[in-house]
Structures are given as C-alpha cells and as structure tokens.
C-alpha cells in the first residue's frame, strides 16, 4: 500500500496505528550548548565541528549576547505501524521508529 505524508510517499504492508507530528521550539542560552546539542543530535547538522562553523557560531554567539537567546524549531514525526499477523501473534508492544532509529 502506498501512502503519502508531507509530500513524501512511503510503503506499508501493515496498519498505521498512529501517526503524530510535533514541532518543537528550541532555546539556546549560550553557543556552547548549541555545539553540544549539534554534536549529540548528529542528524540535525551532519559533520558539525567548531572549526567548520566558526563564523556562523560567532554570529549565533553575538545574537545570544544581543537578544539573550537563540531560538530554533525542529519537527518530529512518529509512525506506529502494526505488521499483519502471519504466524504466531506476539504480545510484545509495537516498535517505535524515530529519527534516531528504533526506540
């Protein structure tokens, strides 16, 4: 079965049990916290290094000094899909797949 979400087609042979979309507001009070976040959440800006983004990080630092914070948003989408039963039925809860892999 072909479905479409946000303009991107995807295939499923199961039943979509739930789909949820969240838009989250981020607030960074210093550029060090921004660097820490970008290094831990690597899919946000791949290959983040201070040397590579020094100029942009300096601009963010100046903005934080001027405005008190740097604000950004990020989106998350969760699809919970149940496979059709093809053998013994499992009592295990469904797996949730997020941006960082299986949760």
Image: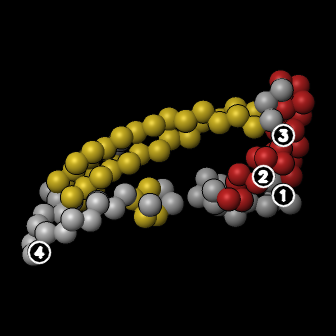
Crowd class of label 1 (few under 14; some 14 to 19; many from 20; radius 10 Å): some
Front residue (pair 47, 37)? 37
Residue 42 position, x and y percent, is 64, 60
Which of the numbered marks, if any, corresponds to residue 30?
Answer: 3
Residues at marks 4 and 1, CA–CA distance in whole angstroms: 52 Å
Crowd class of label 3 (few under 14; some 14 to 19; many from 20; radius 10 Å): some
Please state if 34 lies on the left or on the right of 101 as rendered.
right
Q: Earlier in the sequence, mark 3 or mark 4?
A: 3
Residues at marks 3 and 1, CA–CA distance in whole angstroms: 14 Å
Which of the numbered marks, if any, corresponds to residue 35?
Answer: 2
For the image, the number of numbered tags is: 4
Q: Earlier in the sequence, mark 4 or mark 2?
A: 2
Q: In the rendered view, would you say 9 is above or below 75?
A: below
Residues at marks 2 and 1, CA–CA distance in whole angstroms: 7 Å
Q: Can you say which quadrant of the picture contains the C terminus?
A: bottom left
Q: Which residue is mark 1?
A: 50
């Amino acid at each position: 079965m072909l479905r479409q979400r946000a303009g991107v087609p995807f295939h499923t042979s199961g039943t979509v049990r739930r789909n949820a979309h969240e838009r989250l507001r981020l607030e960074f009070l210093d550029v060090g916290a921004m660097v820490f976040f970008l290094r831990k959440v690597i899919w946000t800006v791949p290959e983040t290094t201070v040397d590579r983004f020094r100029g942009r990080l300096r601009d963010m630092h100046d903005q934080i000094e001027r405005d008190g914070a740097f604000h950004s948003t990020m989106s998350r989408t969760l699809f919970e899909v149940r496979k059709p039963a093809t053998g013994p039925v499992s009592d295990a809860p469904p797996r949730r797949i997020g941006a960082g892999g299986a949760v």
